[in-house]
Amino acid sequence: MKTRLRAMSALIVLACAAGATHAIAAETPLPAGVVAVVNGVPIPQSQFDAVLKATGQPDTPALRAQVKRDLIVKQLLAQAADKANYGSRPEVLGAVKRVRDDAATDLYVRDALRPQPVTDAQVKARYDAIVAAAGQFEYRAEVIAVGDAAKANAAQAQLKQGVAFADVAKAFNTTPNGGVAQWVSLKTPLAQGNTGGLPLPLAQTIASMQAGATTGPIQVGNAYVIVKLDEKRKTVVPTFEQAKGVLRQQLDAQATERALGTLVDKLASQAKIEQ
C-alpha cells in the first residue's frame, strides 16, 4: 500500500511539473491573503509562502509561477478525488489517522513534558568532568580484529609482504567500521572504565606505541587484534566558552529524554496493556 501511495504521489509531482492549468483572471479581486481560488476553494498565501520557502531556491517570478501552478494542480486533483469519494477509502482513512496521531502526539509530548532546566553549574560540571577525563595525548589507530589466531597470523603475513594495512583490514576485519582510524583520547595511567570506550588491553597497547608503528596480534577477549598507530598528538581542549553551547544542548537532550521516560512510565502505570 505504501508503495502504491508513493507512486501516486510521484504522479502528482509529474502532473504539477508538466500540466499547464487553464487559469483565468479573477472576475473580482481575490480576497486578502489568497493566491488563487479553485472552484471556490481558496489557496492561502501562507501555504504558498511555505511551499516557496521549502524549495530552497532563489525567489524568482518563474519559481513563484511554478509553485502557484503546482498548488492549483494539487487542489484540482484533491477535489476530483473528493468528488469520487476517495476520502472514505480505508487506505486514505488510515493515512489520515496516522498523520493525525503523529501530529497530536508531538503536540501532547511538547506540552506534557516537564524536563528539569539545565543550570549553568551543571554545564560547568560537565565540562570539568570531560577535561578531567581527557588524556594528555590523542591517538588515531587502525585495527584488524579477527576471531581466531590463524586468521590473525594470515593477516600479519600479508602485512609483512607489504600489503597495505587498509587493504588487509578490509579483507579480514570483523569490526563494524572496517578498522577505519578514529581519534581517541587516553589518560594515563589507564584504568578500566576510562579508556575512551576501548577494551583495556587495546587501549594500553595503543598508548604505548609510536606513530607509524604496527603491533600484534594481541588477544582482546575472544578476538585477536593487530594495531597500526597512524598519528599521535597533544589533546586540544576547547575553552569553556567554546564548549558550553554544545554541552548545554547535550544536557538539555538528556533532560528531555529522562522526562519522556518518566511520562511514559506514568502513562504505562495507569494503563491496561495486553500483549
Image (cartoon, rainbow, N blue to C red):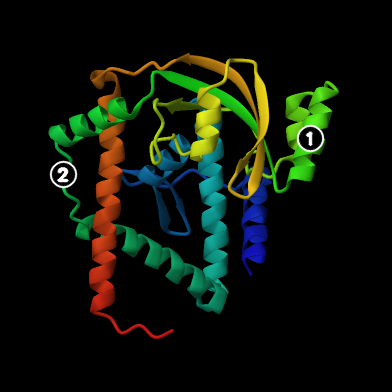
Task: Tell me the SS state at disc 1.
Answer: helix
Front residue of 206 and 266: 206
Q: CA distance from mark 1 to mark 2?
A: 52 Å
Q: Pointer 2: what residue?
A: 117
Q: Nearer the viewer, residue 153 or 172?
A: 153
Mark 2 Cα within 10 Å, few/some/many (few <14, many 20+)? few
Amino acid under label 1?
Answer: Ala
Left of 122 or right of it: where is 11? right
Q: Quadrant of the C terminus?
A: bottom left
x, y (%) of residue 258? Answer: 26, 55
- Which residue position holds label 1? 155
- In the rendered image, residue 249, in percent from the top left (x then y), is placed at 29, 36
Q: Quadrant of residue 274?
A: bottom left
- The mark that comes first in sequence, 1 or 2, is 2
Q: Residue at x 59, y 15 (%)?
A: 211
Q: Which mark is in front, 1 or 2?
A: 1
On the image, the x and y values in percent for residue 234 come to 43, 13
Q: Is residue 43 above or below residue 233?
A: below
Q: Total marks drawn? A: 2
- Please state if 219 lies on the left or on the right of 67 as rendered: right
Q: What x and y, as percent, mark residue 104? A: 32, 64
Rendered image: mark on residue 208:
none
Q: Amino acid at mark 2?
A: Pro
Identify the residue at image location x=25%, y=72%. Answer: 267
Question: Toward which corner of the image does residue 166 lie, by quadrant?
Answer: top right
Residue lying at 46% horizontally and 42% vertically, measured from the top left: 51
Helix, strand or loop at disc 2?
Answer: loop
Report crowding for label 1: few under 14, some 14 to 19, many 20 or more residues within 10 A (C-alpha).
many
